[in-house]
């Protein structure tokens, strides 16, 4: 059956993985996605959906008004978002319960990695200029590199599809009182010709503030209305130029630069140990070359090379005024990181029924940091440096056993070499003990397609991820000791899935189980130190250790239906259960992820020029912990009603209006940090 959801309709793909989605020919793709920058995810491409079980495309990002990565990714079943809380107050993404350390983020297949602590703030990544967000859940191909213990997230940039490919839009954001709250702007200009193309884009988001729900009760730390210290500013510019000499080969150079700054709201009720932190800059820059070349009738060679930088500053002030730095907890800390590396992948087709791929990855990370303290006296540390190399060798084979049955198997070995690890304390440099590490990974998948409308799949995957420098060596302001021998943690995942077309209705379902082993936890113990006279003191400290084990499991269900020519509907539901044993704390519970979450939407176009998109997202309660880390409890669930209406003034001009959290729910995803109340927006879009 050749059923296809309209490109104008927001849809869910029900084809669940006939095999990893091998990229289309370089010069033949008309979707506006940069095919060289895609990774392998478990999904077929029989249709081009706006919203799929593993992807979100540019049109869905626009129509649902999801302008940051954490907000857009949670449209995918099994993906949830929230905030870290604490003084950092960073936006998080969880994929089937796995966190930012266990699910790597890439842009066009090039990993964005902070070697010091891995603390990516997903709220800093804008989406208006993104062609597609890919999420590999559980089963993540070994060909895409190391670290995908719980899955992988990839942002695919845009690629022009015609001689003049231009788009611009701006959105004016209003708060709960219909006052100005900020804006989002985006512009893209590209051109495509027979043998070359060029693309440039710019996106900016400015949040002057956001409002709490009117149902929020004022506290000692936060009055009602505007959330204190909620101002943020981010922008990203990207450019690429590509050469397509024939139907199979492509060569492209890309530059992506983004800069951000943000304040951090404080805990609304805890008055002890408050910290007033800001990030005056949070900047990334990626320069990379991607290519694919047919070197023989049965062989393609794919190359990637990149140079990335990350600059970050964290400033701690005395109080909410953010004007003075005189107290012991006031400081300025800066990171300066760079990475370079690349990969080579050879795809062989010895027969029409087999594809054999071999890949090698290399990455060199250098992290530098310093800190300036102001009390009791001003002191500036010298720069401290860590250098680490990461390697990966992978092989994967896709074999068509029968016209309806395909088997895929892969394996890889990842290893790292720590070249330098130093700290500065008590007026002297410390060289940490250097330990290297390695880990095997393996996966397998069996896909059965008994008829064009049905797909059944079973897979197993065992993946590891290496600990960060922070986990191995950070003293956590004197409260921890290093563990150079900290090993990789691992997840072994099993999944069964099915998809079926029922005429106008498409349904997809999956069930999965993950066993975590050697999970990294912070283990408390007494550490004895002795002075020169032999007087010894027991100090209560912690150390990162591979002592955790756990079980994650759940299920996902999604559907889409073309009810009529003017009405499409769809939705998804995910159940995620997490059980993680922390031998140091019987009360411990995995935090941040609701056990149940869902999303439902409709798109109604009574006339061709008008589009109404109501949608509702819901999540059950989730575990959280108080600031002191002494009490775990469940924080309430929420239901959010959202609406967007677009009117096409002409074929190329669209005016939009809408709102999020229209019933002004008062909710939080972590202890002490409520989420925004009702927000409204007006938008204008111009597109060729």
Image: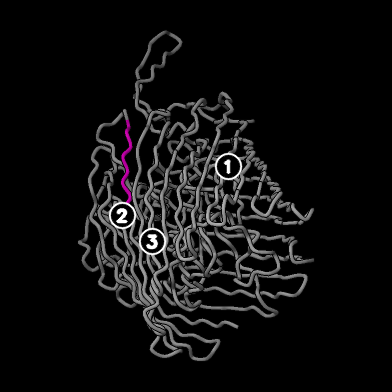
From mark 3 to mark 1, how far is it between C-alphas? 45 Å
Residue 265 placement (x, y as % from top left): 36, 56
- Which circle, 1 or 2, is nearer the viewer? 1
Q: Quick one: 559 or 425, which is closer to the camera?
A: 559
Determine if the magenta segment contains residue 578.
Answer: yes
Residue 472 against residue 599 in the figure, above or below:
above
Residue 300 is a magenta residue: no
Mark before the other along the chain sequence, 1 or 2 = 1
Q: Where is residue 199 in the image (x, y as percent from the top left)?
A: 67, 70
* Chief secondary structure of the magenta portion: strand
Viewer-side label of 2, 3: 2
Give the residue drawn at x 50%, y 37%. 464
* Left or right position of 130 against 611: right
Which residue is rendered at x = 64% and y = 36% of the image?
389
Question: Few, some or many C-alpha atoms within 10 Å of disc 3 (few <14, some 14-19, many ≥20)?
Answer: some
Name the secondary structure under disc 3: loop
Q: Name the residue under label 1.
A: 410
Give the residue number, with chain letter if any, for mark 3: 230
């Amino acid at each position: 059956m050749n059923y296809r959801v309209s490109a104008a309709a927001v849809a869910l793909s029900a084809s669940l993985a006939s095999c990893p989605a091998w990229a289309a020919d370089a010069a033949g793709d008309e979707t506006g996605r940069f095919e060289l920058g895609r990774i392998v995810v478990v999904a077929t491409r029989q249709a081009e959906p706006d919203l799929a079980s593993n992807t979100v495309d540019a049109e869905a990002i626009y129509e649902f008004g999801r302008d940051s990565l954490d907000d857009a990714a949670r449209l995918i079943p099994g993906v949830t978002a929230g905030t870290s809380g604490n003084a950092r107050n960073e936006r998080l993404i969880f994929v089937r319960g796995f966190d930012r350390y266990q699910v790597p983020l890439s842009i066009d297949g090039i990993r964005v990695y902070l070697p010091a602590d891995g603390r990516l703030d997903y709220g800093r990544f804008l989406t208006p200029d993104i062609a597609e967000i890919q999420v590999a859940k559980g089963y993540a191909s070994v060909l895409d590199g190391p670290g995908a213990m719980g899955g992988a997230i990839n942002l695919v940039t845009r690629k022009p599809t015609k001689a003049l490919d231009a788009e611009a839009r701006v959105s004016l954001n209003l708060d709960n009182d219909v006052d100005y709250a900020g804006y989002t702007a985006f512009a893209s200009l590209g051109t495509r010709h027979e043998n070359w193309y060029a693309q440039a884009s710019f996106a900016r988001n400015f949040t002057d503030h956001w409002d709490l729900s009117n149902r929020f009760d004022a506290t000692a730390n936060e009055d009602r209305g505007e959330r204190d210290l909620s101002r943020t500013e981010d922008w990203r510019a990207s450019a690429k130029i590509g050469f397509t000499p024939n139907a199979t080969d492509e060569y492209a150079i890309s530059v992506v630069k983004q800069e951000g700054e943000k304040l951090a709201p404080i805990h609304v009720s805890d008055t002890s140990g408050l910290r007033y932190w800001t990030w005056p800059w949070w900047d990334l820059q990626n320069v990379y070359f991607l290519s694919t070349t047919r070197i023989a009738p049965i062989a393609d060679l794919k190359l990637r090379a990149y140079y990335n930088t990350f600059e970050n500053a964290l400033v701690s002030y005395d109080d909410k005024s953010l004007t003075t730095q005189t107290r012991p907890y006031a400081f300025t800390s800066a990171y300066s990181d760079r990475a370079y590396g690349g990969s080579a992948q050879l795809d062989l087709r010895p027969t029409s029924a087999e594809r054999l791929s071999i890949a090698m990855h290399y990455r060199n990370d250098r992290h530098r940091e310093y800190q300036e303290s102001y009390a009791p006296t001003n002191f500036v540390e010298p720069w401290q440096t860590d250098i680490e190399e990461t390697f990966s060798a992978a092989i994967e084979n896709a074999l068509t056993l029968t016209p309806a049955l395909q088997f895929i198997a892969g394996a890889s070995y990842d290893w790292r070499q720590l070249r330098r690890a130093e700290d500065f304390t008590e007026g002297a440099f410390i060289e940490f003990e250097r330990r290297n590490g390695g880990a095997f990974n393996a996966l397998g998948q069996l896909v059965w397609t008994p008829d064009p409308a049905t797909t059944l799949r079973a897979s197993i995957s065992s993946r590891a991820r290496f600990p960060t420098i922070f986990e191995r060596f950070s003293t956590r302001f004197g409260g921890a000791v290093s563990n150079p021998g900290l090993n990789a943690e691992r997840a072994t995942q099993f999944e069964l899935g099915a998809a079926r077309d029922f005429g106008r209705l498409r349904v997809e379902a999956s069930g999965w189980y993950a066993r975590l082993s050697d999970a990294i936890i912070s283990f408390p113990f007494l550490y004895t130190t002795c002075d020169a006279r032999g007087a010894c003191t027991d100090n209560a400290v912690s150390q990162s250790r591979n002592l955790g084990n756990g079980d994650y499991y759940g299920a996902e269900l999604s559907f889409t239906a073309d009810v009529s020519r003017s009405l499409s509907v769809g939705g998804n539901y995910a159940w995620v259960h997490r059980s993680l044993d922390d031998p140091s704390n019987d009360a411990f519970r995995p935090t941040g992820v609701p056990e149940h979450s869902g999303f439902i939407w409709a798109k109604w176009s009574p006339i061709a020029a008008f589009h109404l998109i109501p949608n509702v997202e819901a999540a059950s309660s989730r575990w959280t912990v108080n600031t002191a880390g002494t009490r775990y409890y469940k924080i309430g669930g929420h239901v959010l009603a959202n609406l967007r209406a677009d009117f096409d003034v002409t074929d190329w001009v669209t005016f939009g209006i809408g709102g999020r959290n229209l019933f002004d729910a008062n909710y939080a995803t972590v202890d002490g940090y409520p989420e925004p109340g009702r927000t409204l927006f007006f938008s204008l879009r111009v597109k060729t």
